[in-house]
Image (cartoon, helix red, strand yellow):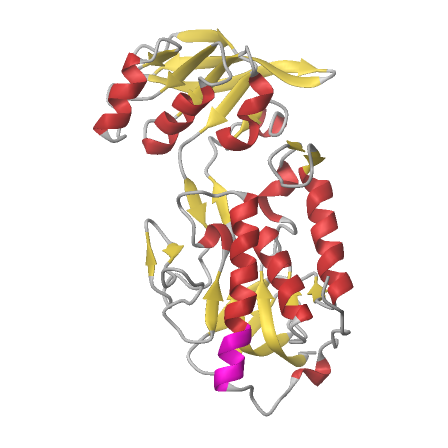
Amino acid sequence: MTEHRHTKVLIVGSGPAGYTAGVYAARAMLSPVLIQGLEPGGQLTTTTEVENWPGDTEVQGPDLMVRMEAHARAMGCEIVGDIVTSLDLSKRPFTAQTDSKTVWTADAIILATGARAKWLGLPSEEKFKGFGVSACATCDGFFYRGQEIVVVGGGNTAVEEALFLTNFASKVTLVHRRDELRAERILQDRLFKHPKIETLWFHQVEEVKGADSPLGVESVVVRHTKTGALTEIPAKGVFVAIGHAPASELVKDVLETHHGGYVVVEPGTTRTSIPGVFAAGDLTDHVYRQAVTSAGMGCMAALDVERFLAEHGTSDADAASSSSAPAHSEA
């Protein structure tokens, strides 16, 4: 049986941007509802130690997301374990269909669906994710001080990550399946001149090998794309840098996007090309892709929504069917 519910603010996505938006929208007495999506907590749930979250010298990624969820709940944000399958943004109130058959209407929407790293698709890669296999050098490079590292890719991201990792690693091997990089020439020049970096042309990763107890990477097996010859490279870390894909499937044909699907927002705001629809976090960010910047954008989105609703009002159907947020004093 289909259930129909209305809320002033519907937040789609549950990473740092979504949960922070939930905190701020709830404190503004907007009775927000957050739908978590397929991966509650987002990319941080696949990360182990996080050392660059302000206020925590070290925190486990999943633990940080549990705390963010609890914080949003405590402020009065209703959190729903469901998946939005389609959005109708053609008129206000906007409509969201979900996997549970609940139909939501909302006076404003905050999109915080994030982005997903592209992976190689190897079983061994999956086995060591978070235990030596990573897609974020700025997140995890610090853990490989004095170690040998492999970076996979040939674009700007791969070259930037290889250069960044030289701050920690004793050696960085860049594995690329062709004999020419796609990265900007200035980055290539820096890469080729760096004494710690070796480039392995015409190779692709076949297998990540390592120990089971404790779980950790020890080497990478690569195959020559022309001869088929296998080579095993010692490595404690493998950084897959073949790009990110924004999770913009719900809106890619409706909202303005760029850089392969990232949602365009008005500079200095979280406003999208449709009034009343806001976007935050990695869904909009092809440059920084950090938890702290995503959280900052979640805050911005909630404040932008508050101003929008103050100027444009809400529909006749109020948020009575949603949970009401309790009042909280300013910290």
Q: Quadrant of residue 98?
A: bottom right
Q: Quadrant of residue 258?
A: bottom left
Instruction: From the viewer's perspective, tell me whether residue 195 is left or right of residue 215.
Output: left
* Front residue (pair 3, 145): 145
Q: Relative to 213, say whether 45 is above or below.
A: below
Examine the structure image and report whether residue 293 is included in the region drawn in magenta: no
* Front residue (pair 100, 284): 284
Predominant secondary structure in magenta? helix
Give coordinates of residue 139: x percent, y percent: 55, 32
Q: Quadrant of the N terminus?
A: bottom right
Q: Residue at x 38, y 18 (%)?
A: 175
Q: Quadrant of residue 126?
A: top right
Q: Relative to 228, say whether 132 is above or below.
A: below
Give coordinates of residue 163: x percent, y percent: 39, 22
- Most distant residue in the left direction: 185
- Most distant residue in the bottom direction: 316
Instruction: From the viewer's perspective, tell me whether residue 238 is left or right of residue 182.
Output: right
- Residue 232 seen in render: yes
Q: Residue at x 64, y 57 (%)?
A: 19
- Residue 93 seen in render: no
- Could you tell me how many numbered marks the image carries? 0
Give coordinates of residue 326: x percent, y percent: 77, 74
Q: What range of the chain is rendered magenta?
A: 306-312
